Image (spheres, rainbow, N blue to C red):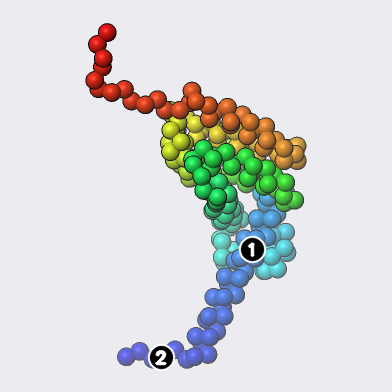
Amino acid sequence: MGKSVPKKKLVAAAHAAGDEESARGRLLNAATRLFCRYGINATGIDAIINEAGTAKTTLYKLFGSKTNLVHAVLESEGKQWREWFIASIETGGGDAQTKLARIFPALKQWFAEERFYGCPFINAVGEHDKDAKQFRAIALKHKKVVLSHIEKLADEMGAGEPEMLAHQLALLIDGAIVAAMVTRDPKVADTAGLAAGNLFGPSKARKPKRSAQLVAV
């Protein structure tokens, strides 16, 4: 049998792992705040480590590069936003149309927050070379999850073209986010919500299938 590891070494290793996890969390939180407020390109490594209270070597040990840190921030922010968004429209129950109608009131609350700086994915793609695929791929992955949930509700609502309705609502969502970021006016969500309401009309509902038996005329 191998030698047992001394208890002190186990404790030291556990503390080191905890410190590393704590440092990772502080770096992610600091980078998120700075990237969202000032932009990715305008935020240097020194600003991030000063905000997080860590050494530069710690950042590179945990993330390898600023680009990897940006990826980690986007993944984390996307996950949190999706969980919030889905919970906001699902909480309270109701039918599918009721849930879809909650989208823009939820966005209005988000727009009113002091630390609302727009969509981190739109901002990241907007800041970088438009031919660069790295940030666009993460953004599309995020949007795919959001679209999928909206499309599922659109299908449950009986929309004639659930996928099309999901994309229409997604365009209104993105437009409202950008407008709110530029104007700092949460009420743009109300305007987007009115436009969305026009998409829920009876003419957009799925028509029932005709019976196979037709009455002769």
Expressed as whole percent of the image width and height from the top left, the position of residue 89 reads: 55, 46
> What is the three-letter code of the residue carrying label 1?
Leu
Q: Which mark is residue 40?
A: none
Residue at image position (57%, 70%) is 21
Residue at image position (55%, 51%) is 91
Which is more toward the observer, 164 or 1? Answer: 164
Q: Is 148 situated left or right of 74 in this image?
A: left
Expressed as whole percent of the image width and height from the top left, the position of residue 6 reads: 47, 91
2 or 1: tag closer to the N-terminus: 2
Residue at image position (62%, 40%) is 104
Which is more toward the observer, 25 or 184? Answer: 184
> What is the three-letter code of the residue carrying label 2?
Ser
The answer to whether residue 125 of the structure is visible from this angle is no
The answer to whether residue 64 of the structure is visible from this angle is yes
Residue for badge 1 = 27
Task: Tell me if residue 166 comes above or below residue 211 in the rendering.
Answer: below
Residue for badge 2 = 4
Circle 2 SS class: loop
Q: Residues within 10 Å of mark 2 (few under 14, many from 20)?
A: few
**Looking at the figure, which quarter contains the N terminus?**
bottom left
Circle 1 SS class: helix
Task: Tell me if residue 139 comes above or below residue 70 in the rendering.
Answer: above
**Looking at the figure, which quarter contains the C terminus?**
top left
Which is more toward the observer, 106 or 26? Answer: 106
Task: Tell me if residue 144 comes above or below residue 68 in the rendering.
Answer: above
